[in-house]
Image (spheres, helix red, strand yellow):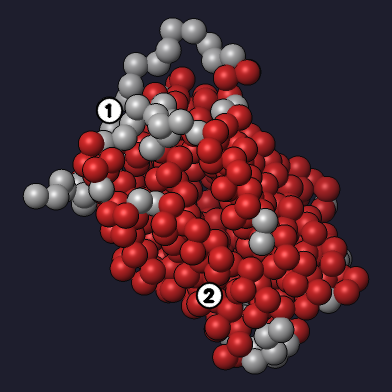
């Protein structure tokens, strides 16, 4: 008989993730328009997401290690509380350099939420249903992405400050929810974490495959709405909605396959789909073509991310789960930040077609990197007999 998956703690973490991503993906698609309103260029708009995600990326291993040390739920409460202030700061700042500075600190705290919540969830999901559980957990962020950009852009029409007040209110909800979340903390280590312990180089090297795959995702996050406007495709949030719905469908129907046949057999075909999606987007001038790209990318990312996490968790120390998630966040956000910055520069000079074709070529390196680097990973102590047998 299968172990129960949808426990009270699982549902609490799922709802927390939904609210966190619902807030973030109202901000991220809207802030390029805010930067343009302040006199910035397309490359400046992409620069914000770049610094935000780079800060998240390089802070993630440190924040993950810190969460392992001070307590993972405590990290969620502290970061959510600080998000309230940052949301209001976005509303009043009009200088682009200062806006970027806020993005750096905000992004670093965001990585703490991702690493800490991921570690808590990894302890909540039964080992025999790890890929399935991670996939369902990922649906929380995907469902938020499906609706948040459209809502955020609609609220933005009523004023930037109005949107920022709404984001602050969501941060209040996150703070209260994380404080009440059922979770038993592990005893904190008696010694302070050393800086050299914040990076797991084996995980980081393997996760580089995820970084190159997510390069184009950074361009999509920053520019899918602007591309739609330039090419006369309505509504501007269409790509996000279709992409998110596809991910949900893919994860519901394919996630048990990762537990049955192994996450690697889901991961590799999923990585193949991503460069194809970027090529279709580069050449998309109609609604049907844009939808096709969103579906292909949803299939790729929907299958790849939970399978990759499950693969890594099988081979790492469960006592360092937040650090492990921090290394994965480093890779994913480095790819997104690099892609946002580079796609913005290329789009400014040569247009979106060239920019996304380059992203497609870059993402082709994900499978060779994974195949070469994953051999260095051993099998960790967190593998369930059921999962190993499967």
Mark nearest the camera among 2 and 1 is 2
Relative image position of residue 304 (x, y in whole percent):
48, 58
Q: CA distance from mark 2 to mark 1?
A: 40 Å
Residue positioned 47% across, 70% down in the render: 299
Q: Where 196 sits versus 326, above or below?
A: above
Q: Is residue 217 left or right of residue 11?
A: right
Per the image, the residue denoted by label 1 is 184
- Neighbor class of circle 2 (other Cα within 10 Å; few <14, some 14-19, many 20+) is many
Residue 100 appears in the picture as rendered: yes
Q: Is residue 336 left or right of residue 10?
A: right
- Residue situated in front as seen by the camera: 5 or 183: 5
Relative image position of residue 229 (x, y in whole percent):
71, 83
Q: Where 7 sits versus 63, above or below?
A: below
Q: Find the residue positioned furthest to the top.
A: 190
Residue positioned 53% across, 38% down in the render: 375
Q: Find the residue positioned furthest to the right.
A: 349
Looking at the rendered structure, the secondary structure element under dot 1 is: loop
Per the image, the residue denoted by label 2 is 296
**Marker disc for residue 117:** none
Residue 108 appears in the picture as rendered: no
């Amino acid at each position: 008989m299968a172990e129960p998956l949808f426990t009270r703690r699982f549902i609490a973490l799922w709802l927390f993730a939904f609210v966190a991503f619902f807030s973030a993906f109202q901000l991220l698609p809207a802030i390029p328009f805010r930067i343009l309103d302040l006199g910035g260029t397309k490359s400046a708009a992409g620069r914000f997401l770049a610094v935000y995600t780079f800060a998240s990326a390089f802070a993630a291993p440190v924040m993950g290690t810190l969460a392992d040390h001070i307590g993972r739920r405590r990290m969620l409460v502290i970061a959510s509380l600080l998000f309230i202030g940052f949301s209001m700061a976005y509303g009043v700042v009009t200088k682009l350099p200062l806006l970027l500075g806020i993005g750096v600190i905000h992004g670093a705290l965001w990585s703490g939420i991702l690493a800490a919540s991921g570690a808590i969830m990894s302890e909540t999901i039964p080992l025999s249903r790890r890929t399935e559980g991670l996939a369902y957990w990922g649906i929380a962020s995907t469902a938020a992405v499906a609706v948040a950009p459209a809502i955020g852009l609609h609220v933005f029409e009523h004023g930037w400050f109005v949107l920022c007040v709404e984001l602050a209110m969501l941060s209040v909800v996150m703070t209260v929810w994380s404080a009440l979340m059922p979770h038993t903390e592990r005893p904190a280590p008696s010694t302070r974490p050393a800086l050299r312990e914040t990076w797991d180089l084996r995980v980081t090297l393997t996760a580089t495959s995820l970084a190159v795959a997510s390069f184009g995702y950074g361009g999509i996050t920053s520019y899918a709405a602007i591309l739609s406007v330039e090419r006369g495709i309505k509504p501007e949030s269409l790509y996000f909605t279709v992409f998110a719905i596809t991910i949900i469908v893919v994860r519901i129907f394919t996630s048990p396959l990762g537990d049955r046949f192994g996450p690697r057999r889901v991961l590799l075909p999923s990585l193949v789909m991503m460069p194809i999606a970027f090529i279709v987007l580069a050449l998309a001038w109609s609604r049907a073509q844009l939808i096709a790209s969103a579906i292909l990318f949803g299939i790729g990312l929907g299958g790849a991310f939970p399978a990759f996490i499950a693969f890594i968790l099988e081979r790492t120390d469960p006592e360092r789960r937040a650090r492990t998630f921090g290394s994965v966040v480093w890779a994913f956000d480095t790819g997104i930040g690099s892609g946002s910055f580079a796609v913005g520069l290329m789009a400014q000079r040569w247009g979106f077609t060239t920019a996304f074709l380059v992203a497609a070529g870059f993402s082709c390196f994900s499978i060779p990197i994974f195949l070469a680097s994953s051999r260095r990973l051993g099998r960790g102590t967190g593998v369930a007999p059921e999962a190993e047998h499967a």
